[in-house]
Image (cartoon, helix red, strand yellow):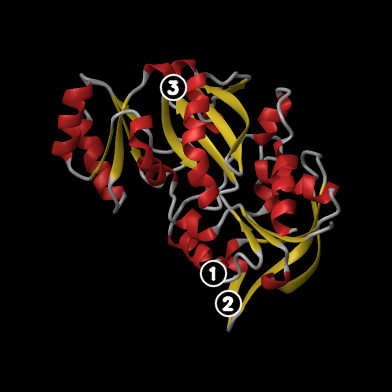
Amino acid sequence: MALRIACQMDPIDRIDIRGDSTFAILLEAQKRGHDIFYYTPPNLALHGDKLLARGHSLRVTDKYGDHYALSDFRVEDLGQRHCVLLRQDPPFDMAYITTTHLLERIHPTTLVVNDPMHVRNAPEKLFVLDFLDLMPPTLVTRQLDDVIAFRAEYKDIIVKPLYGNGGAAVFRIKPDDSNISSLVEMFQTVFREPFMVQEYRPEVKLGDKRIILVDGDVAGAINRVPQEGETRSNLHVGGTAAKIALTPRDLEICERLKPELKRRGLLFTGIDVIGPYLTEINVTSPTGIRQVKAFGGNDIAAMIWDAIDAKVA
């Protein structure tokens, strides 16, 4: 059945369609005959009991540099749509959190993917703390003494912001690095919230797996290999995508997560695994589905729409 859908996302003229998962999802929606209404987060408004958005009808084309066409600017009542895709990228700040409060007013009568309440309650680096036994040794703090003691125990560590994304502000501090005090001072100045400290895992040199799950089930995976001399493996900071097979440990991690992902209505998630360890659960705007398909894997956009279609029906 053709659906009337809306997509809340970043400005479509700024995305790189070659690796953008939202764009792949929109292509599949259009292929299925779904009517697409597009808007950006600042154009969301609550008027009484109606959640409204200023936006356009959208057509997409898989052609780099000429990938979209907008028409029929209007104000839409999102409560009259079958489904809303919550797909803007972090930062996961108060603006982002406010959109989840607003979208929660129409969900689940209008299906919001992912469930806005659980997106709000499951930031990537906090939700994962529910599974500490699957993670490398981890500390969340704002105190220099805590970080110094953690490094004394684990020697080689990673420091990163709780609400960062894309590898931004991720630092490796080696046992002999004398900048630890300055780095913590910078984090205390720039960020009001605590930050995360983890044991550095040398397996990252072989890659950081992104495993994608649809309604809790494994849909595909890619490996992201960092550049020589780089700690971060994120693709947009120079990491290279590679085909990867999942290990029994990877599948064990996914099975542990599945019941909780389904319970929370997190239909499209991406988890990060380094060696035997789970490091993040991405629920805001997971990526990687175009890379999975490019390496001969599943058409995850189609799997996402199969799941959405079933829920709406």
What quarter of the picture does the C terminus occupy? bottom right
Q: Quadrant of the N terminus?
A: bottom right
Q: Are marks 1 and 3 in contact (CB under 8 Å)?
A: no
Q: Is residue 91 above or below residue 73?
A: above
Q: Residue at 67% of width from left, 29% of height from top?
A: 291
Label 1 packing within 10 angstroms: few (<14), some (14-19), many (20+):
some
The three-letter amino acid code for the residue at tag 1 is Leu
Residue 230, disc: 3
Q: Are marks 2 and 1 in contact (CB under 8 Å)?
A: yes
Residue drawn 59% across and 74% down? 45
Indicate the position of residue 126 as horizontal and vertical percent values. Answer: 37, 46
Q: Earlier in the sequence, mark 3 or mark 2?
A: 2
Mark 2 belongs to which amino acid?
Leu
When asked about the image quadrant of residue 44, the answer is bottom right
Query: How many numbered dots are placed on residues in this image?
Result: 3
**Distance between the Cα atoms at labels 3 and 2?**
45 Å
Q: Eyeballing the image, is 192 above or below 44?
A: above
Q: Secondary structure at mark 3?
A: loop
In percent of width and height, residue 218 lies at 60, 33
Q: Which residue is mark 2?
A: 46
In the picture, measured across the screen, residue 147 lies left or right of residue 258, that is left
Of 26 and 300, the residue lying toward us: 300
Mark 1, residue position: 102
Which label belongs to residue 202? none
- Is there any visible trace of residue 226 in the rendered image? no
The mark lying in front, picked from 3 and 2, is 2
Callout 3 environment at 10 Å: few (<14), some (14 to 19), or many (20+)?
Answer: few
Q: How far apart are labels 1 and 3 at the CA level?
A: 40 Å
Dot in front, 1 or 3: 1
Residue 9 in the figure: left or right of residue 121: right
In the image, what residue occupies the spot 74% across and 46% down? 306
